Image (spheres, rainbow, N blue to C red):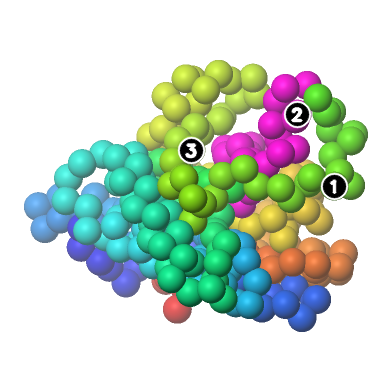
Amino acid sequence: MLRTERAHLYVAAQTHPGLTGKNNEDNFAVSAYVISDMNPTPSVFAIVSDGIGGHKAGEVASEMAVNLISAAVAKREGGHPLAVFQNSFYQVSESIFKAAEQDSSRKGMGATVVCAWIIGQQLYIAYAGDSRIYLLHGRRIQQLSRDHTWVQEALDKGILDHSGIKNHPNLHVIRRYLGSNTPAEPDLRLYTQPGESDQQARANQGLMLNPGDAILLCTDGLTDLVSDSEIQAMLPGRTLQQAAQALIDLACERGGHDNITVVFLGVPWNSAKINPGWLPG
């Protein structure tokens, strides 16, 4: 693919270390491309990663995840986007694990990751961990990803209901992340409706986005403190950049106990007439 300085989508991104004084172990990137000289179809790739591990090790792991997966996407020459995710997640997870094994100060480091790849107006996603991807469409918000946490597994099995999760001691026990001793598989399920089977969710890949739709990628520093309905309510009357800032401000007002990262990708209402958005620096 060929890198471009502008995206065919609106792009807004904000990150904040939170209010507890910890290092910002979140990393993100947004890149724009056209497929080739012969194929001018535009493409935008966004990735958000939340590091796991102390002594700045989580920061290292999330940076590795962002840089290496972004590089794999940039090198794509043919092949399906999901195949790129499949190969890159495995290789990056193994690279993070080996880097941790070689440096005792980084032992146990890892990273959650969420990726959104929009080719034309078709959406492909992949993820591991408890960072999230949402679709905002009009007055509706839909979590496209599924958390890889102990609590989510308990909800799926009927062991817990939603009333019992907010203060559960296992709330942040992550079941899948890059850098684990068994290389992490990307989750390729894309949920558009409640109750969809895993097979239906995988078949939703390549979802056609509509004018005015927005995709949100974020870390749990946001979703721990701001509800889905509150996220949706931030968009009307604001630009995406204003909405991103407003969400971070709200999370900070409620304690900001973790790093907070928000990335929006917005589909223009009239792509033929609108100036493409500048990518964040």
Q: Earlier in the sequence, mark 1 or mark 3?
A: 1
For the C terminus, the quadrant is bottom left
Q: Earlier in the sequence, mark 3 or mark 2?
A: 2
Disc 1/disc 3 C-alpha distance (Å): 25 Å
Question: Picture coordinates of residue 141 (x, y %)?
Answer: 66, 40
Q: Is residue 157 magenta?
A: yes
Disc 3/disc 2 C-alpha distance (Å): 18 Å
Q: Residue at x 45, y 42 (%)?
A: 186
Question: Picture coordinates of residue 261 (x, y %)?
Answer: 63, 65
Which mark is on residue 155? Answer: 2
Q: Which residue is mark 3?
A: 187
Q: Earlier in the sequence, mark 2 or mark 1?
A: 2
Does residue 97 appear anywhere in the picture?
yes
Which mark is on residue 95? Answer: none
Q: Residue at x 64, y 57 (%)?
A: 219
Magenta residues, as a range? 130-158
Badge 1 element? loop
Question: Picture coordinates of residue 55 (x, y %)?
Answer: 63, 77
Q: Which residue is mark 1?
A: 169
